[in-house]
Image (cartoon, rainbow, N blue to C red):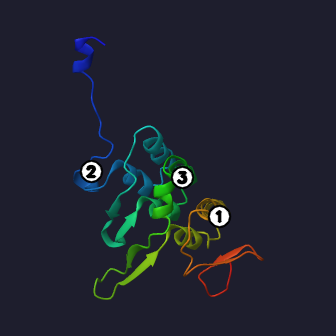
Amino acid sequence: KSEHEHEHEHVIDVNELSQGQGQGLSAIVMCAVANCDLGVELLINVGNADIDVKQSLGLNGNLTLLHILAENCLVKSISAILLKYPKLTAIMANIRGTAITGIDTETAIIIGNTPIELAAMTSCTSNSHVKDMAIEVISLLLDVTTDFTSIHINTTSGGIGNGSGSGV
């Protein structure tokens, strides 16, 4: 390239944290929160986005990127992370991210769920498309999840529940 062409090149750091309204969030987390499966997939495969981040999302506590992807059933993104970063994904799959429920911080309940548990909870919907995507996420995460302390997978009826034995 000529010297003139180099002057007009812009280097974009996909791991730079946002300023303003989405303050403090990386591009990949903003895509994940916005359910933009293609955006996350591109940032993983092309942009070398940092996936080993815990983000504080206001009242949602500290979650890994995999938690957000699993809860939002972003199948392509999870597949891309599993393919590119299998060891790191296996670690994130077994982290209990903290999510805070309730508006009043004094009465809020702190819940720790793994990504597969979040996908299982998402599968409890009457929307068949969302349910199918959640089940696909669960099947992707089954091989890397070892912490099944609060999830019950009923293989005879194909249901997924919260440990009480009641499947979906």
Q: Secondary structure at mark 1?
A: helix
Answer whether labels 2 and 1 touch (C-beta < 8 Å): no
Residue lying furthest front in this view?
87
- Give me the residue at 31% from left, 46% from top: 15
> Where in the figure is residue 150, as x and y percent of width and height?
55, 81
- Give me the residue at 42% from left, 80% from top: 111
Residue lying furthest top in this view?
2
| Residue position marked by numbered label 1 in the rendering | 135
Question: What mark, if any, has residue 17 been given in the picture?
Answer: 2
Q: Nearer the viewer, mark 3 or mark 1?
A: 3
Marks 2 and 1, how far apart in space? 32 Å
Q: Quadrant of residue 103?
A: bottom left
> Where in the figure is residue 84, as x and y percent of width and height?
50, 46
Image quarter of the C terminus:
bottom right
Question: What mark, if any, has residue 54 been given in the picture?
Answer: none
| Residue position marked by numbered label 3 in the rendering | 82
- Give me the residue at 27% from left, 11% from top: 2
Q: Earlier in the sequence, mark 3 or mark 1?
A: 3
**Would residue 127 appear left or right of 101 to someone viewing this image?**
right
Q: Earlier in the sequence, mark 2 or mark 3?
A: 2
